[in-house]
Amino acid sequence: MIRRRAAGAALAVLTLACVGPAGAEAPPPVDRPGPVGLALGPNGLVWVAFDDAIHGIDLDAAPGAPARVVGTLRDGWETKSPATCPSCDFVLFTARRGAESAIYAAPLDGSRPPVALRAPGSAAGWKQLVLHPSGRTAYATDSKRDRIWEFAIDPEGPAITGEGVLAEIDGAYFIHLLADGTLLVSSRSRRLHWLGLDGRVRAEWNLREACGFGVIRAVVAHPRTGMLYLLKNRSVMRIEPTDDGSGIASCVHVVGAAGSPEGFRDACGHTIRFDRPHDLEVAADGTELLVSDTGNDALRRIPLEPGPGAGCVTTRPLGDAAGR
């Protein structure tokens, strides 16, 4: 379900002004690559792709508490996009080494090494994965062949038991599974595509024209309101399509602003700073957004509930938790 406004509503590009305490100005020390892809999993853990492994982070644990490390790869492979589900005991993830990419699976308890479900190769450009809550269907973007793939998953393996091309989208990049099973796909043309279960495009929005978007990093939908949140290079925006899906009714900066410099700052509204943010998730209860801030080696947390902290970013450093 996507929350939309009536057609003809005036388009507005706004920045939310928040009142809150000024945050830290100095970035956490970083001497190696930070987090990239995010996924929400069972037991309240956030699964984060770090370098050559997938790390399960408990946000309620004390900073620096050890993470659960699974899916460790070797020989220069980097993990990129994890996917799991509330009932899953495994994680799927994409990985890359130079021009090669692959899809792996690993048990969440770390009892076995990762297994390649799609062998390493340079023909496909596996970018991002999402997994249905049942754990039996996965979707992946193939940025080299401009395709959205649908995979039948046997959770007992896990293993891929069937596959097919769901849709072809020029420059397909990031993907998000909505509660009704439909998909949102961003493309390098700064467009957002809403796909039905049959692979047909229900709506397509040019966010470059409507909202002044540069690069769309990631997109998620709020589990209760259906509101869309998109991660740009240095800001997070809330997007409301029109009721008939023909266009965008409003674009609101939740945190950050167009043209903000890279860096680190915990603050509110447009004054916060990111350094190469990569992925975006919304908590299962809808109370906050999570951003993987690669350059700052941290998870940035953005409360969404009404109150003095709404739209004020706080930081969870991850270097110690990841044993780095």
Image (cartoon, grey):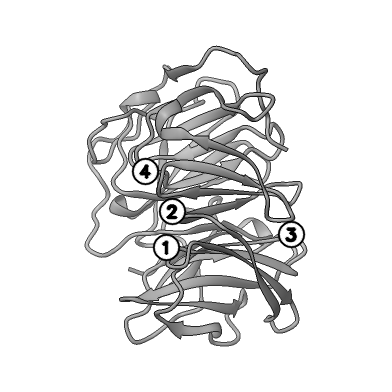
Image marks 1 and 2: residues in contact by CB distance under 8 Å: yes
Give the residue type at disc 4: Val
Residue mark closest to the camera, 2 vs 4: 4
Estimate how packed mark 1 is, as few (under 14), some (14 to 19) or many (20 or more) residues with alpha carbons within 10 Å. many
In the displayed structure, 183 sits above or below 301; it is below
Q: CA distance from mark 3 to mark 2?
A: 29 Å
Image marks 4 and 3: residues in contact by CB distance under 8 Å: no
Q: Residue at x 59, y 13 (%)?
A: 9
Earlier-in-chain disc, 3 versus 2: 2
Query: Tag 4's secondary structure?
Result: loop
Q: Nearer the viewer, residue 182 or 17?
A: 182
Image marks 1 and 3: residues in contact by CB distance under 8 Å: no
Give the residue type at disc 3: Pro
Residue mark closest to the camera, 1 vs 4: 4
Give the residue type at disc 1: Ala
Query: Tag 2's secondary structure?
Result: loop
Q: Quadrant of the N terminus?
A: top right
Q: Which residue is the site of mark 2? A: 63
Q: Which residue is the site of mark 3? A: 133
Image marks 1 and 4: residues in contact by CB distance under 8 Å: no
Q: CA distance from mark 1 to mark 3?
A: 27 Å
Q: Which residue is the site of mark 4? A: 215
Q: Residue at x 59, y 22 (%)?
A: 306
Which label number is shown at residue 308? none
In the displayed structure, 103 sits above or below 175; it is below
